[in-house]
Image (spheres, rainbow, N blue to C red):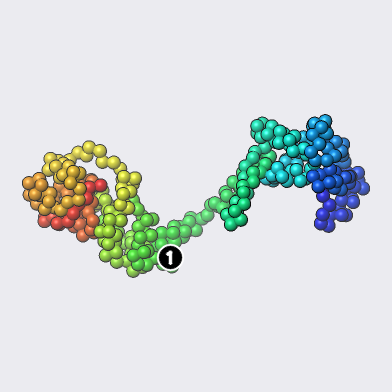
Amino acid sequence: MYKRQGDATAWLAQLAGQGRIVETHLPTAHGSELRWIAQELLAEYRAAPARAGDAEETAAAFPRVAATLRRLLRHSGPISRADLLARYAFDSAWLDDELARLIAGRDIVQANFSEPDAEANLPVVLQLLDRHNLASMHRRTLTLLRQEVQPVSLAVFSDFLLRWQHVQPSTRLVGAAGLRIVMQQLQGCAAPTVAWTRDILPARVADFDPDDLNALCQSGAWAWVLAGQEARRARARFVPRGDGRLLLAPADDPALSGSTAAVYVFLQNEGASFVADIQSGLGLAATTVQSALVELALAGLVTNDTLAALHVLQQFSVPGAAPSLSLIHI
């Protein structure tokens, strides 16, 4: 069925001349309207009720009226009950029963397919949609989404990575604010300790200042964690405070030597502590506490709130004087 509109007069005249369509009056909620319909559907449309609300006529012509309703739904996008009643002279009670039957049989779905207008503050209007049309919409949506992800050459992908990581000169960040963005991207990444302040961060932050990184750690926003068998070869990871358990492997029942285990238990019970506090609390020598802290740091079990301790740990090859800095259990 087609309504006359636009400049389709010549086309409609050609189809009518071929006997493929016919123009006839059809009952609607607003009275009789002259419409074009396919010739083979003429008997079906003439069986429609003469006026809206005529339940007896609708019941008598049920098979053909139901076919008209199904055809309309199959060839429509989301459509409301009010739109259906405005288009055809369906009896309201019959239409509600028929729609309920189609919904129960999963031939159509009912939902709000239109994005609500928050400014208009209008009530939500449920709409009806043929399930095949809904499936087609989903397939086309997936097709459009997949077209947004296309394979590219290695050179293009490498250029993207350099820009996204802010290594490409034109994309480098600046200042403490830029450093925070870079740290978010690199959180949990393991790299040699010395490489962080010498290579990695300067390559991404144009005016990188180690004091800015130190300030982030001292503020409590970030913590560093070491991993490695030897201090000089240890790899450091920076993690946001509180996210360590998500990014780090759990350290359940670590195999520690006697004094190291004692220091570990002390930090677990006491929390952040100065080296002098650990010595006093356990009655251990400074060199013993220092060795224990190095072992715990390399195992990723303790960290410090300054970069100074990280650099000291990185340089340890033989026991020496331990820095008097607070170490925090993770």
Looking at the picture, tell me which residue is in the foreground, 7 or 102.
Answer: 102
Tell me which corner region of the image, top left, top right, bottom left or bottom right, holds residue 174. Answer: bottom left
70 versus 299 height, above or below:
above
Tell me which corner region of the image, top left, top right, bottom left or bottom right, holds residue 131. Answer: top right
Does residue 78 appear anywhere in the picture?
yes
Q: Residue at x 38, y 60 (%)?
A: 181
Q: Label 1 amino acid?
A: Thr
Q: What is the tally of numbered marks visible in this picture? A: 1
> Is 290 left or right of 218, judged from the image as shown?
left
Residue 110 place in picture, x, y as percent: 64, 40
Residue 316 place in picture, x, y as percent: 17, 54
Q: Secondary structure at mark 1?
A: helix
Q: Residue at x 62, y 52 (%)?
A: 122
Residue 204 place in picture, x, y as percent: 37, 63
Q: Which residue is mark 1?
A: 171
Q: Quadrant of the N terminus?
A: top right
Residue 272 place in picture, x, y as percent: 20, 50
